[in-house]
Amino acid sequence: ETGVTQTPRHLVMGMTNKKSLKCEQHLGHNAMYWYKQSAKKPLELMFVYNFKEQTENNSVPSRFSPECPNSSHLFLHLHTLQPEDSALYLCASRGTLNTPEAFFGQGTRLTVV
Amino acid sequence: GEDVEQSLFLSVREGDSSVINCTYTDSSSTYLYWYKQEPGAGLQLLTYIFSNMDMKQDQRLTVLLNKKDKHLSLRIADTQTGDSAIYFCASGGYNTDKLIFGTGTRLQVFP
């Protein structure tokens, strides 16, 4: 148990659906991340939020829309996804950008059909 | 851009030592990490080392850093079947967003 909780653990959605992934931490961390993990590829950094402000958007398509309403919660809103977006989506949190430890959630396994 | 590279597979016998290697390109990396991922799970932080250190030991784990060559290694002593997993190397900087990960090394431990 890392203290970072992601829901749902598994999600199957059609290409025309809209869904959201949720990440929650009560570690008092101020930086939160979304990563995409696809088979046989390095972890891809998608978005970073620091003190609720987005500080990194790693050329992610607009069909992925992040939201960080407070330092404890991070969402990833999904709409009109493609089958190649099927992957494990991982959330991570870090105390501040100056603290080394970054903890990950269990991930959401997304399948787009 | 920044890059982290690892070999894809390592197979060892139970009880032997495992050494997983990693190279990185970002010379400004302040922290170097090792994460473990078991099937169906997220990434578990195993250990990390500051770039001003050349070695860190934590029970069965020994991390060696050669900053000149930008080479990081993780040695697992007395490897057990429960150590079978994917091990990720990552680099991060001080006061920077980015945590850059390698592709991961799949460690298989056989009896």
Image (cartoon, coloured by chain):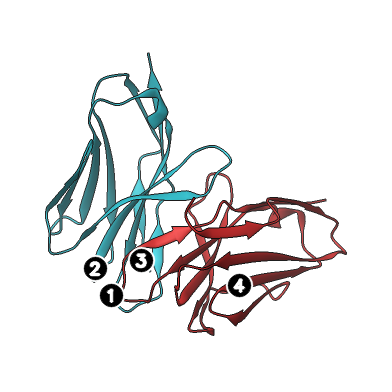
Residue B46 image point, x, y percent: 34, 48
Tell me, what hue is chain B?
Answer: cyan
Q: Nearer the viewer, mark 3 or mark 4?
A: 4
The quadrant holding residue B106 is: top left
- Distance between mark 4 and mark 2 Cα atoms: 26 Å
Q: Nearer the viewer, mark 3 or mark 1?
A: 1
Image: B79 above or below B2: above
Q: How many marks?
A: 4
Q: Does the residue at mark 2 contact the one at mark 3 (Cβ under 8 Å)?
A: no
Under tag 2, what secondary structure? loop
Left or right? Give the position of A57 relative to B3: right
Image: A9 above or below B1: above
- Crowd tier of the residue under label 2, counting other residues whose Cα lies within 10 Å: few below 14, some 14–19, many 20 or above: some
Dot 1 falls on which chain? B
Amino acid, disc 2: Thr
Q: Does the residue at mark 1 contact the one at mark 2 (Cβ under 8 Å)?
A: yes
Residue visible at 84% across and 60% down?
Answer: A15
Circle 4 residue: A74
Circle 3 residue: B2
Mark 2 and mark 3 on one chain: yes
Circle 1 residue: B94
Which is nearer the N-term, disc 3 or disc 1?
3
Amino acid, disc 1: Tyr
User: Quarter holding the N terminus of chain B?
Assistant: bottom left
